[in-house]
Image (cartoon, grey):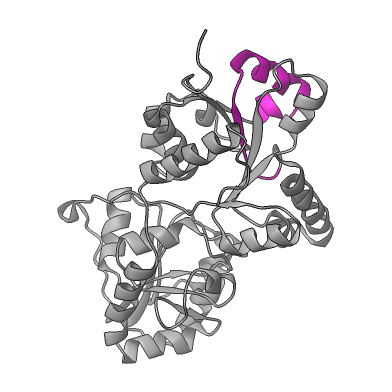
Amino acid sequence: MENENSRVKRILMISSIRDDRWVTMPIDELFEWRPYSLQGILYNLTKIGWVERRAGNKECFNPRKLAKVIDEFKPDIIYTYGSILSIQPLISRKFWCKHKNFKVVHGWDDRYGDIWHDVYGWLPGVFMRWFEKLMIKKSDAVVTLSIYQKAIAMDWGVVCKYIPNGCDHLEFDKSKCDIKLEGDLNIVYTGDQARWKRTAEICEAMRHVPKNIKLYITGRHYAYLDEYASDNCIFLGYISKNDQWCVVDQADATVCTSNQDCNAKIHEYLRMKKPILGYDGRGNMLFKNGHNALLTRDYKSTLMYLYEHPELKEKLVENAANDIPVYTWYEIAQQFSDYFEGLLSGNEYQD
């Protein structure tokens, strides 16, 4: 008979990612497409020895349909990501699954209620704050990459496992990038610029600083920011990963405007050894303001201070490197694997 401890473990990862490639791509191609976050974790779990399967809206929105997927795959862990599909595995297990011997672990990356309030309005925000608390309390276990959210969960009587974001060592070819940053102080913002990210605040600040202080923004176009485009607020749009890292490499400082302590770009900036400007809010859970980052609600004054004190950049980078480890996605996956193994052996309160 197969030894339970030596049996290959199975993980079903559920996400509301709407791109069909999330479900259909082979795992190595999925990781090549998006070598970070869920893809980085899952790909490297397979390297450690886990067998994976992925599911999305089509497979999971109906709990009865999801039960068939569960019974076919027989997962040990179901890892849920995002707000919409996270309660379905619990419903499936209670009413329809024949295979019930699995743990439902929620990956809690964002404050869903806050986002729904900002994106959809007050009433949807109220609903999602209630639903968010429900899913955190009802899941068998919760993993969060946010120190702030770990504290929130404690207030709700839930012990979360903290596993931070990761970032692999970044390789890029400067000779293949034609983008040259031209300011005397170059600030770079990469990634999503949705309204709830508060990107407009740094854009607005650029109207009030000298033209030789320049902000370069990469990523998807958001029309609401068009009014800020200027000689010193430059939108590069989508660029290749090689160009993105070349742009960050040229930066004097990088910025993360969202009220978070866990945004993926933070660990990318840390990996690139760049000073970080951030929003003076939840970021204080990760950073020590003025020591390893500059956190502010007045970007104009902070940009001018950094411009007038260039020696501060090296200090911020050195202190951040000493204070905040940056793990590769394989190392992050190993932390997940160790935690999952502990859950399956009955050790539910690891930290």
Q: What x and y, as percent, mark residue 310?
A: 28, 86
Q: What x and y, as percent, mark residue 133?
A: 77, 52
Q: Residue at x 72, y 48 (%)?
A: 136
The extreme top residue here reads 1
Position of 201 relative to 250 (above/below): below
> Relative to residue 209, is residue 246 drawn left or right?
left
Residue 190 visible to the viewer? no
Residue 75 among magenta residues: yes
Q: Tell me which corner region of the image, top left, top right, bottom left or bottom right, holds residue 18.
A: top right
> Relative to residue 31, is residue 225 drawn left or right?
right
Q: What x and y, as percent, mark residue 207?
A: 47, 83
Q: Tell me which corner region of the image, top left, top right, bottom left or bottom right, holds residue 73.
A: top right
The stretch of residues the image draws in magenta is: 57-83
Position of 156 relative to 82 (above/below): below
Residue 321 among magenta residues: no
Q: Residue at x 34, y 75 (%)?
A: 319
Q: Which residue is nearer to you in this view: 217 or 322?
A: 322
Q: Tell me which corner region of the image, top left, top right, bottom left or bottom right, holds residue 212.
A: bottom left
Q: What x and y, as percent, mark residue 315?
A: 30, 80
> Relative to residue 250, is residue 285 drawn left or right?
right
Q: Which residue is nearer to you in this view: 222 or 17?
A: 17
Q: Residue at x 59, y 37 (%)?
A: 343
The mark total stands at 0
Q: Residue at x 45, y 25 (%)?
A: 25
Residue 152 visible to the viewer? yes
Position of 237 relative to 141 (above/below): below
> Relative to residue 20, is residue 235 drawn left or right?
left
The extreme left residue here reads 175
Q: Which residue is nearer to you in this view: 142 or 254?
A: 142
